[in-house]
Amino acid sequence: MSIIDVITRRRFSQGLLTGGIAALASRAPAQTKGPKTRVPIVMTAGVSGLVLHEMALAQGYFDDFSIEPDVLTVSDGTKSTAALISGGSDICMWSGFNQLLPAIEKGARLRILAGALSLPSLAIYSRRPEIKSVKDLEGKTLGIGAPGAVLHQMIALMLKKKGIDVASVNFRNVGGNADIFKAVVAGTVDAGPSDVDVFDQQERYGVHALADGLLWKEVPEYTNQASYASVDAIQKRRELLVRTLAAYAKVYRFVSGPESKDAFRRAREKVIGRNEEHEASTQWNWIQANQPYCKDLVLSDDQINLVQNLNVEFRVQTKVLPMSAVADMSVARDALKLLG
């Protein structure tokens, strides 16, 4: 199966992941701009993000800003938050941030710094022929991740926009995106959201995407992933965070352009350990068509407050916090200055 759900907490400063992820270490040496500074980074271990990281390595973007990423991969945003609070990592490069906001409300000294993946790269799939639209999910079982997590919130937002009572859908926590897709294919759930890399292989897997279940079209206002850091790191290592964001902004811009196709394919092959030409093309074409990455880094107050309001609705946050308490976009703006 082409979708890989990686759950690991191993560091791969030399670029190595296990559990179906191939070695990322071997790459052509890039010309460095000067002595490099180590930056401890945490990120959720999804294939899409790891592909971007490998592309940044291969293109020499970290060398451009004289940084040496030391990456910790974790299974979810809660663990990303924990890595920052403990001081083990300086910055989370990409993760859903709905769990970050209640942590801040409870006293965690963390701030959102930038956007990462703005659009959800997910579609709702089903193998049941009678389920053709989101309306048909009423009374059905939908595979989902943890209650109240990003995926649950996005689906709930979509249902509400379509006038469907969220309580009319039976949510079942079956794990990450890959697990959800497996459950849909096996028929243990009636439907579920999963990644776009199988979007044009629906016949192969015996499933179909719901006509109005393309989340990047139905809930484009929901920011999927962001970058965030501890207040301590912002105060003590701000310049390093600025350079780190600049390096990743370069790869967001590169992958969003037509010249990146071969680099994307090579990076994806290295990350997953095998050549999946069809899936790679599907994913890359989706990126070109939808431009999901936050190339200019800065998130608006409205984007952040949308998630805050959903948190309040889900009762994981008691109130909407002032922007000064949850975000510092000045770091992203300084990073953009380095890009010219």
Image: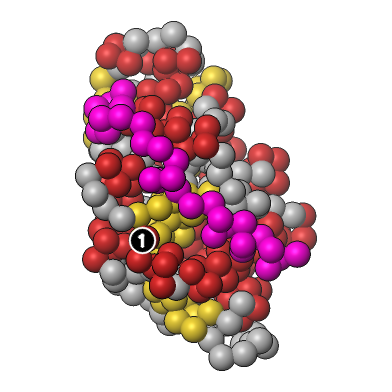
Residue interval drawn in magenta: 312-340
Quadrant location of residue 14?
bottom left
Quadrant location of residue 333?
bottom right
Dot 1 corresponds to which residue? 230
Tell me the element at label 1.
Answer: strand
Instruction: Report the quarter where the C terminus lies.
Output: bottom right
Front-most of residues 68 and 236: 236
Coordinates of residue 133 in the picture (x, y in percent): 48, 15
How would you rate the neighbour count of disc 1 (Cα within 10 Å): few for under 14, some for 14-19, many for 20 or more? many
* Residue 64, above or below 337: below
Front-most of residues 152 and 294: 294
- Residue 256 appears left or right of 123: right
Coordinates of residue 72 in the picture (x, y in percent): 35, 69
Coordinates of residue 67 in the picture (x, y in percent): 53, 79
Q: Is residue 326 one of those drawn in magenta?
A: yes
Front-most of residues 159 and 302: 302
- Residue 89 appears left or right of 172: right
* Residue 86, above or below 116: below
Front-most of residues 205 and 297: 297
Query: Label 1 sits on what residue type?
Result: Ser
Going 35% across and 54% down the picture, which residue do you hit?
110
